[in-house]
Amino acid sequence: MNKKINISVLLMLMSQLALSSAVPVYANTDLKKEEIAIEESLTTEDGTKKDETVETTSVTESSISKTEPTIEKEVSETKSVAEETTLQSEEIKPIKKDRFLTVTNENTKIWSEKIGEEQVNVNIELFMKTFISKEEVSKGNKLYFSLYQSNINGKDIFIGYIESSSVRESKGGEGIYQPFNKYVTVTNNNDSTYSNFTWKKLNTTREMSNKTFLAKGKYEHVNGLTYFSLFDDKGTWYGYLESSATKVGGGKEGTYLNYGKYVTINNPNYSTYSNFSWLKKEQTQNLLGDTFQARGKYNHLNGLTYLSLYDDSGKWYGYVNERAVKEGAGRQGAYQSYGKYVTISTKNYSTYSNFSWNKRGNSTNLMGQTYQAKGKYKHINGLVYLSLFDDSGKWYGYINEKATKLGTGRQGAYQSYGKYVTVINKNYTTYSNFSWKKRNATKNMTGKTYQAKGKYKHMNGLTYLSLFDSKGNWYGYVNENAVKTGNGQEGAYQSYNRHIIINSKNYSMWQNFDWKLKHKSTSFYGQGLIARGKYTHFNGSTYYSVYDAFGNWKGYINATGAKLVSHYETRTAYHSQMAIEAWYGCAAVSLYTTLRAKGYAGNVTLVNFINGLPLSSNNPDVGQIGDPWGRIPFKQVISPVGLNKYARKYTQNTEIITGSSIDRVITEINSGNIVLYWGRYLMERPDLTENPQHVMMAKGYKVVNGKEYILTQDPGLYSSTDYRAIRWFEKNDFNRYLTKKHRKMMVIR
């Protein structure tokens, strides 16, 4: 070999050295600093260090976190292709070992064989991609490398030649480190990250799925794939991950992820944001309990997830930290504990078994009932649905809260009532509140009428009325079982069945409680009538519902216009048939006694009156069959028909009342009249049904401890001092006695 230096070769060598020093090595100072400063120490899952060192990268491995291999050595070891190559003019020289070159010139040219003359049309992206170079060629003062695209079938595809100044060599198929500094979200949960490009696995994406990382740099591998170098927000390195396992986002929030679930705001201490520059949009305190659709979400680099919220109309409410919400099972949103008591207040709402709207019941059938709304849902449609339970824990379904009214406790909601009620049970208590503080006792209120302005249908199933008197005084809450509801201010009808005497001429007797007149009391003055029922009016007055003995209603009268009969009797003299030996003269003596007591027959003696008694041989309706003195054998006492005829010789104020009720007898007595009745001597044989042969008088009535009595007088004793001559019989006993004796009676008025 000629030792003299060829001038042209020397010039070419000098030129190539100059070009080599000018090859772009990303002279950007920041990039170089970043590449050199990446090396960090990381720990394994159990917190220990690993000593294994990745060849040529000086990176300590960890199963959880790694520091990316330092780029400094790679940069320093990257050689100018021109420096290590002896130029040979237009000579193709095979390279013993394949080189890995990354195209760094965006506007580079590619030639096939005639370098500098004919460019190749390349259908693939070249810029910043990594290729294999197998040959080099020099022409003139420049050096060129062949480029091959790696093929998965094992046969590399020739692309063309590229000028050496347009490429940069890397020490491996990953190519050169390229700054990226974008935020990516891992979208594949079935991949791995690597601690180096000899494919030593570092992490699985199962733990990283849907999380956002900073891809500080990337590598365009000769295999055609791009690998991101991933870091979390604390600077922990997670290794290299193939880019298709990620999605690039617009910022630290990462990429938008479809979500579509329904969430309910349950924390008041968060903000929603208009963007990820943290421009506040709303406070969650103002949205508390509302349900939204989280159409999408972002798993931010900071480790938090932000949901993109929309209402049912599509209005956007911003991004919110998912910690401010609770996920629901559907459009109803999340279950919210409630625990309050509500009363059904509106008809025609359905209850539902689920939020697919399977109907369960209807509020019409539940009106006024109180339930515990243990939970509620604020549906995305804007309506609130309550989950209702009764006191036994039975579930009644979901109902729109518009069908209910909220109560302050187990008593439920106040319900306007306004009805008039009369206390009828003395064994209850009234309360000042629903903590059961006693206020009064119904024994002090029995029979009085109050206005129940409102009511509560308690959770315990009972109804409590709020009672007021006519002056507006409040009497507390009372169980409705203690009262009876009236049709108006008169209150409830109270069965009474007491005998009265109209003792005033100037009272009205009303047709109704709208005060339509039916009678004036003067028409019944002094008469005995029956108060079948009574009303204790809200105005404080008591009104009797008045009937005569025949069941004819006479109207309502203020109780002050009538006298309640507790004792009444017509005084009479005692005339004894026995004392004058009128052994069969009971009818005549009883009639005479009655007429004289009523002011009749004043001009006739008892003996003459007895002698005047009509007699008959065979018909008691004409006269007595048998002489009162016993001179003619006695066979049958005179009948009411026969005796009435005789009485009318002295007065027309007589009436046969055979068959009348006991009330008719009492009203006659209370009207001041005396009733003659047919029976047996001394009221004997009350058990025997027979044709009676003895005439006595009923002349008095009284009530003692709720029991009624009839006063009788029997002329068959020698003296009134005999206890059997004038005595009281319990009303029911007397009534049964009349029945056994065929209820034969007449009255003298």
Image: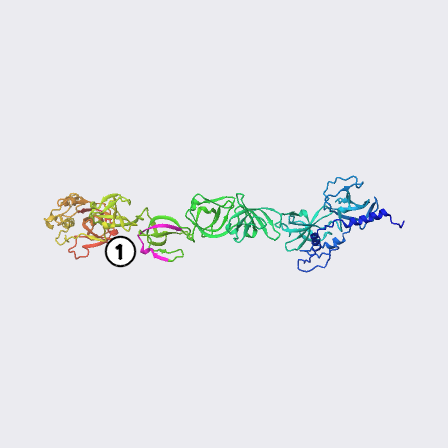
Q: Is residue 614 magenta?
A: no
Q: Report the side of 561 relative to 444 (left or right).
A: left
Mark 1 Cα within 10 Å, few/some/many (few <14, many 20+)?
Answer: few
Name the one closer to the observer, 310 or 594.
310
Name the one closer to the observer, 509 or 220.
220
Name the one closer to the observer, 645 or 681.
645
Q: Report the side of 485 relative to 500 (left or right).
A: right
The answer to whether any part of residue 689 appears in the image is no
Tell me which amino acid carries mark 1. Asn
Instruction: Measuring from the top left, give residue 410's x and y in whole percent.
Output: 43, 53
Q: Report the side of 611 relative to 473 (left or right).
A: left
Q: What span is colored magenta in the figure? A: 438-456
Name the one closer to the observer, 310 or 515.
310
Instruction: Measuring from the top left, give residue 313's x and y in whole percent.
Output: 52, 43
Reading the image, the residue beneath label 1 is 705
Q: Residue at x 90, y 49 (%)?
A: 2
Q: Judging from the image, what secondary structure is the residue with disc 1 in? A: loop
**Residue furthest out toward the right:** 2
Instruction: Measuring from the top left, give residue 606's x and y in whole percent.
Output: 11, 50
Main SS class of the magenta portion in the image: strand
Q: Is residue 446 magenta?
A: yes
